[in-house]
Image (tube, rainbow, N blue to C red):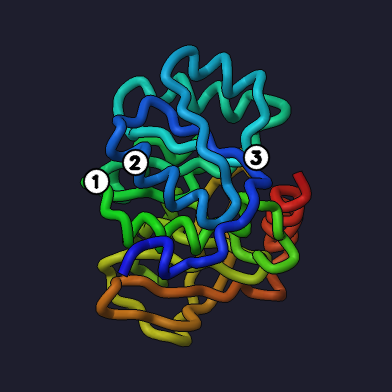
Amino acid sequence: MTLSAQIPNVKKATARAALVDMKDTARLILSDCFRQFGIESVAVTSRAPERLTKEKFEACVIKLHPGAETVMDAVRASPSNNRMVIYGVGGSVQDAMKFSKYGINAVFNEPLERQTALKLVRSTQMLVLHEFRRYVRIPIITEISVVMGEKKFSATSMEISTGGMSLKSSDAVTPGQAMEISFALLTLPRIWVKGTVSWRNVAKRTFGIRFDAQDERRRKIKQWVESYLEN
């Protein structure tokens, strides 16, 4: 079955994604995936920092290699693009963690595979298209410090909302366990907040926590999420 057969109604482009220094094969796959959801792909092969500062884009795809910081700095410093969705292209979440201060939202694993890439674009396209009333969770990758009793470990964030967060870690947790986590997100300075494990997927090494409604520090997270969605 072809990609177009799976998604017959290709939407009219209403947003733009910059594909920064992508090789032809990767560019064609990504362009095809984005097009299915009404997102126009624009190849950016030169003066990327300058273009991403001056031109309006809703998303960008950047290969996670030395030098990517220059492009990401330009994105986050741009008045019009500082909240754009950043997709990394790399081998693993660990690659993205090297750039966590830039708030990478999702990662395409290499080598790019069409169906996997399409699945990732589908899961994040509402955020790119600013359909925020339907999208209450923000995908974002950053390091999370976890304290659970006397146990301490690190995890990687997957999504955050005003009420909780999903994380990935090989450390064992059980639904109902209390913990305190610490993290920083772009314009949100490092913050600590209490929460409770609400679910666990052992096979995928993922779990979710629900923020403690009585923890006043949760308000700062709520304000950050709402501000992110409004911009």
**Is the residue 71 above or below the residue 31 in the image?**
above
Of circles 3 and 2, the one toward us is: 2
**Is the residue 143 above or below the residue 68 in the image?**
below
Toward the bottom, the furthest residue is 176
Q: Which residue type carries mark 1?
A: Glu
- Give the labeled residue for mark 1: 110
Marks 3/2: CA–CA distance = 19 Å
Q: Which residue type carries mark 3?
A: Arg
Which is more toward the observer, 227 or 120? Answer: 120
The part of the image, by quadrant, that contains residue 120 is: bottom left
Marks 3/1: CA–CA distance = 25 Å
Q: Earlier in the sequence, mark 2 or mark 1?
A: 2
- Give the labeled residue for mark 2: 89
Residue placed at 56% from the left, 56% from the top?
37
On the picture, is 112 further left or further right than 218?
A: left
Picture coordinates of residue 197 (x, y %)?
47, 79
Q: Earlier in the sequence, mark 3 or mark 1?
A: 3
- Give the labeled residue for mark 3: 83
Picture coordinates of residue 55 (x, y %)?
65, 23
Q: Is residue 108 visible?
A: yes
Label 1 secondary element: loop
Marks 2/1: CA–CA distance = 7 Å
